[in-house]
Image (cartoon, grey):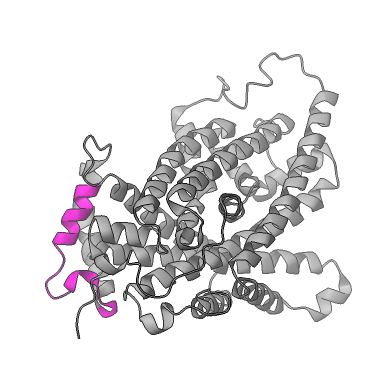
Amino acid sequence: MATPNIAAEAASSSGPRLRRTLTLTDLILYGVIVIQPVAPMSTFGVLSNRGQGHVVTAILIAMVAMLFTGISYGRMARAYPSAGSAFTYVAQEIHPGLGYVTGWSMVMDYILNPLVCTIWCAQQVYQFTTQVPVLAQHVPLFAWKIFFAVTFTLLNIRGVKTSARLNTALTVGMGAVIIVVFVAAIRYILGHPHSDPSFFTRPFYDPRTFSFSGLFGCTSIAVLTYIGFDGISTLSEEAENPRRNILLATVLTCLVIGVLSAMEVYIAQLVWPASEPFPDTDTAYVYAAARTWAPLFGVVGLTLVIANFGSGLGAHLGAARLLFGMGRSNALPKSFFGAVEPKHQIPRNNVILIGAIALIGSFFFSYDLGIEMLNFGALIALLRARATKEAGQPGSTCPRIYHLFRSLAELGPPGANRGRHLDDSWNYLRHLENKLVPHAAQL
């Protein structure tokens, strides 16, 4: 059987295409929804404890770092404005084998995101309904898992514009809650005057607790606030003017989320100083919001469920497009993964497959295990996309990463055909990992 040339076909204009209907605003809203405009709320307690109160500073530092990666994705989208994202970029610029491995890393990330969101949303709604006797007796946990997995699938089958309209509605709803939180917090802060002149600057820098180890440890966690923005590049083939809009949408999404996240944690730190322990670290932001206005305890909790619903829906959409890009390039069976449903012009087979995986996986995966695996896949894809952008550029800021990946690809195991075939992919990945370890210190 002839070996498919992944590098040549990954960005090929031949074969089935998706409909270009997404505007710049649609792309930004998609990115905001996938990342979640309330992203730092769920990790606020962990960030505050790790950074000893310097959460705002950590969020802003992480934003600067992620902006560079966002620019890398945007510039690669200019060169290859097609579905596939980092899979296409790495296959084209570095090596087909590494593109294949990167694609599977992204697949793990994008498939696990709707799976994790299915688990989390089902658990939270089930816990809420236990307070309602009628629902508690008749709606078990597994029914909620089925509900969310099927809902993600049906909404994405209706087409990308349906998802875009829903993203707009979710953004408006969460935006309204965020405004209420801001108003309640401002009223609370102004109603409790402070004579300490450093009260309003302490969330940025507190000399009594500041340490570089604490700040950078907090920043390493704060970076996860931005995980998911790379999903914008998977919609390159459905975006209007992708060579311009993908870059703008990626950068603007990082800026919007960064500034909004910094504002959210800033008011929370003013309301609940780091010197006071939280009743529950996992729900620290909910307690801080409730201190300003008691009803916000339930409102913010519901908002987090909505945010995870939107994130799961968007990740489901991105995963289907990524599999479509790999299928069209023959990295996966083209007849199934590269097929486009003619009416809505979407990769319906992939949408249904992702939904089935999310549903089945929700019965076997725990939330914690899903999060650990999701972060692993996301960071691999981000690192390789960053290295790809640096490929061949004079004065590159990270040439060692690029040359390391390139050399690993060229040193592929004999007979594995550089990881282009599905049955060789696992051995090829293990081979790369074995070579990566002794070279890591050189980075």
In the figure, residue 13 lies in which quadrant?
bottom left
Name the side, left or right, on which 405 lies relative to 36.
Answer: left
The segment highlighted magenta reads: 402-423
Along the viewing direction, whichever of 51 and 145 lies nearer the viewer: 145
Is residue 233 placed above or below 345 in the rendered structure? above
Residue at figure coordinates x 45%, y 35% from the top left: 216
**Whether residue 429 can be seen here:** no
Name the side, left or right, on which 146 lies relative to 137.
Answer: left
Q: Quadrant of the N terminus?
A: bottom left
Is residue 270 placed above or below 235 in the rendered structure? above
| Residue lying at the far left of the rendered structure | 414
> How many numbered discs, if any?
0
- Residue 207 screen position, x and y as percent: 55, 19
Is residue 372 placed above or below 413 in the rendered structure? above
In the figure, residue 68 lies in which quadrant?
top left
- Residue 393 screen position, x and y as percent: 23, 41
- Residue 306 screen position, x and y as percent: 70, 59
In magenta segment, residue 410: yes
